[in-house]
Image (cartoon, rainbow, N blue to C red):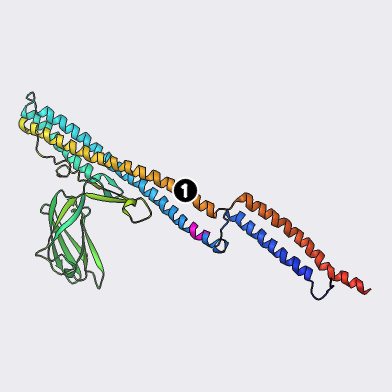
Amino acid sequence: MAFRIATNVASLNTQRWLSVANAGMAKALERLSSGYKINRAADDAAGIAIATKLNVKAVSVAKAIDNGNQAIAMLQTAESGIEQIGNILTRLKELATQAASDNVTDTDRSALDAERQQLVAEIDKIAQNTKYGSTKLLAGANSVSAYGASLTPGYGISNIDVTNAAITGTTTFTLTVDAGTDSVTLTLTDGTTTQTLNVSKPSNMSTVTANFSSLGVKVTINSSIVDISAANGFTVTVGDSSFTYQLGDENQNFNQIGISLKNFMATSSDVLNISGDITTKSSAQTYLGTIDNAITNLNTQRANIGAIQNQITYHLANLEAMYENTRSAVSTIKDADFAKEMAEFTKYQIITQSGIAMLAQANQLPQLILSLMR
């Protein structure tokens, strides 16, 4: 064995092993502190890639579960409105039955019909007011089915928003525009209600929106706006309110559930189609069949809503199981085993303490060599 002073090989060897033990202890401390056995890609490149994908999946599934719960809440809101409309139909059937009998007079029937008119009006109010947030559920969805030739961006009309237009069936609106130098005057009418608004004329590429609150229509104009007085009508039609609920993390049909909610306005032919009166015995007898048809159609639509709710509930049960299993998979890959990591920490702690003690001994070896020179 050679004895050297210039290079303390034993010390260097001890330092190397001490560095290994210190790194192992630091790694164990990091895992115990973070709770993860993979804290960076270098720890497990393949593992962190898989865990990241699974984590994205789990987060998306969790949001899909939220979507499903909100969808059920939306449909329950719609159903509560339908239930009240059903109660009104029950009362209308009661009034019609009473009016169809000869033991009441036409004067009595007029009184009964006065209540009938109020109840029919209330059906429309319920249909208009049943909303999820700001979204109407039972009044159908408005859409523009025909534009006049002048109602285009080239003439200065950027957009016509009819979402909140209170209409039944089909309504034609007429728009007149008087474009001045600095301001623009717009007049909108549906044949019954007319509203006129003055707005500033937009410049360059900007736009200005005129809100015809009395008609529930918003007209957005741009800097190309010109006088419009002919071919300026647009027709608005009420159709079904269609909703699609995203209940998965992919844009696929199997991750989506859709429903179309019909128009429950009293005179709409979609569901109720209530017409007539009960001012005479014969009209009351006819009204009995009208209400029966309305009740049948309402029950059909309510059953459809119930079926969709059940479908979403089963879909959510599957999503919840998927979320649990995905999180479990991520945990298996990424989470630290505390028992194992504590054992590793203890091992490296002892090795470090021992290494420090041995380093002290190794550093004393050159001094021992000096004793040979005495």
Q: Nearer the viewer, residue 306 or 311?
A: 311
Label the magenta part by its dominant secondary structure.
helix
Q: Residue furthest front?
A: 1
Q: Which amino acid type is shown beneath numbered disc 1?
A: Asn
Residue 271 visible, this angle: yes
Answer above or below: position of 202 versus 251: below
Q: In the shown orientation, is residue 48 left or right of residue 370?
A: left
Instruction: Measuring from the top left, give residue 103's x and y in whole percent.
Output: 8, 23
Please state, as top left, top right, bottom left or bottom right, where the N terminus lies in the image. Answer: bottom right
Answer above or below: position of 292 versus 32: above
Is 60 magenta? The answer is: no
Q: Residue furthest right?
A: 374
Label 1, residues with CA under 10 Å away: few <14, some 14-19, many ≥20: few
Instruction: Measuring from the top left, give residue 250's x and y in whole percent.
Output: 36, 56
Residue 113 visible, this angle: no
Labels in figure, total: 1
Bounds of the magenta segment: 47-51
Residue pictured at 84% horizontal, 67% vertical:
364
Q: In the shown orientation, is residue 365 left or right of residue 129?
A: right
Instruction: Measuring from the top left, give residue 251's x and y in whole percent.
Output: 34, 56
Q: Residue furthest top?
A: 103
Instruction: Measuring from the top left, give residue 113's x and y in whole percent.
Output: 11, 34
Please state, as top left, top right, bottom left or bottom right, where the C terminus lies in the image. Answer: bottom right
Residue pictured at 81% horizontal, 68% vertical:
363
Label 1 secondary element: helix
Q: In the shown orientation, is residue 241 left or right of residue 18?
A: left
> What residue is shown with label 1?
325
Q: In the shown orientation, is residue 349 left or right of residue 96?
A: right
